[in-house]
Amino acid sequence: MKKKNLEFETLLIHGTEYNDQWGSATVPIYQTSTFTFKNAQHGANLFAGKEKGYIYTRINNPTIDALEHQMAILEKGYGGIAFASGMAAICATYMAILQTGDHVISTNAIYGASRVVLEQWFAKFGIKSTFVDTSNISEIENNITSSTKILYIETPSNPTVKITDIKKASEIAHKNNIIVVVDNTFCSPYLQNPIELGADVVLHSTTKYINGHADVVGGIVVTAQEELYSKIRKTMIYTGSNMDPNQAFLIMRGLKTLALRMERSQQNAMRIAEFLESHPKIKKVYYPGLKTHPQYELAKKQMRGFGSMISFEMKGGYNAAIKLLNNVQVALLAVSLGGVETLIQHPASMTHASMTPQAREESFITDGLIRYSVGIENINDLLSDLQQALDKV
Ligand SMILES: *Cc1c(COP(=O)(O)O)cnc(C)c1O
């Protein structure tokens, strides 16, 4: 039976391309830095790419390979490249594609560090970047120049969960020979497959939903085509930003329950979004599953569910936000997201503190904004936790 024909949930369990002589049911951890050659010719053939096999763990390793294969299948792409972290995956993608004089158009409200690397590091090498509200397609169109090489999209965006139409954005980008990169961390392949919608590269911080247990950091890139795959893999190898076999093992273990975790957490998220929307101390709730969300219809079309990331703004601004953070008892006060545990944080002073105040304002990251990553706890505990914390505000 062709694995590609299996349903998503089955691929989570049986999607790894791994077989060994012992019939291991799970992929073992190959805790080795290097692999011996059968003879000199074998070594030379491996280096020349004439034979398939393993050379050195920075280049590849059976445990990491298994995760890369599985993610490529889940994201419906050509191949996967695993990295030490999500940021390593993002930086390697930029390094592989861009050169001095090139220009990037990006969603303005993205993961804080993804923006900072462009503005503070890639800018040093003469790479320009423009940050726009990509949920408004004309803002993309109006900022394309002859040097634009990458359109970088995060959808839903972070932390304001705005939705960008990947299909429309990709059509415009491709007309202008621009490579489309989508950070799919918030959705995971369970909810959205950007490559099917036209993206050239999809990437994840596997630290989040893919692993899902807040116990490992990692990243992965999946490309639609061979050419970009080879470029980005080479960048990974030469910058030494590879994943470690232990990381790959833990991520594969977490990945098996992705569908179950996503289902439960997004059910919880819907209930919480509705609760918050009707609460008198809350000014605004950002959640694509709410009919009041400006791109509710697009989210319904583009995503197979609304996910479990919520942001909301407190009527009492900064002081109210801080009061709430200091009074929750079930949700953990911590950054990161996409794990089995509910996390709460304050973007303006935490995840997005490195952005300039002006950039934050343009991206609607106000001082009263809170980001809430919904876990898989019992919904009643999460609701009463928020209720009692809001009572103290
Ligand atoms: C966490 C995150 C990243 C960065 O990933 P790390 O694994 O922390 O390096 C990038 N994009 C998004 C959307 C994230 O949530």
Image (cartoon, helix red, strand yellow):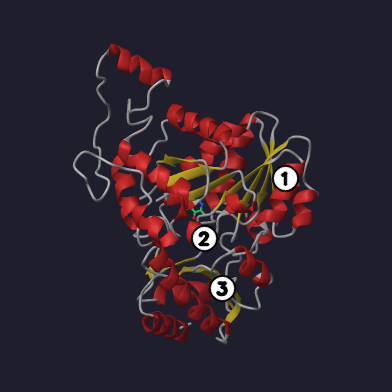
Decide: few, some or many residues near mark 2? Use Cα within 10 Å; few <14, some 14-19, many ≥20. Answer: many
Q: Which mark is residue 173?
A: 1
Tell me the mark number nearer the camera, choosing from 1 and 3: 1
Q: Which residue is depicted at the point 31% across and 17% down?
A: 42
Q: Position of residue 153 (x, y in %)?
A: 62, 51
Q: Say if mark 2 contacts mark 1, CB within 8 Å.
A: no
Q: Earlier in the sequence, mark 2 or mark 1?
A: 1
- Element at label 2: loop
Reading the image, the residue beneath label 2 is 187
* In front of the other: 296 or 194: 194
Q: CA distance from mark 2 to mark 1?
A: 22 Å
Please state which amino acid type lies under the numbered disc 1: Ala
Q: Which residue is depicted at the point 75% across and 56% down?
A: 137
| Rendered view: 144 above or below 355 | above
- Element at label 3: strand
Q: CA distance from mark 1 to mark 3?
A: 32 Å
Q: CA distance from mark 2 to mark 3?
A: 19 Å
Query: Is residue 252 among the parts visible in the rendering?
Result: yes
Q: Which residue is depicted at the point 52% across and 84% down?
A: 275
Decide: few, some or many residues near mark 1? Use Cα within 10 Å; few <14, some 14-19, many ≥20. Answer: many
Tell me the mark number nearer the camera, choosing from 2 and 3: 2
From the viewer's perspective, is 351 left or right of 141?
left
Q: Residue furthest left?
A: 22
| Rendered view: 113 above or below 161 | above
Reading the image, the residue beneath label 3 is 312
Please state which amino acid type lies under the numbered disc 3: Phe
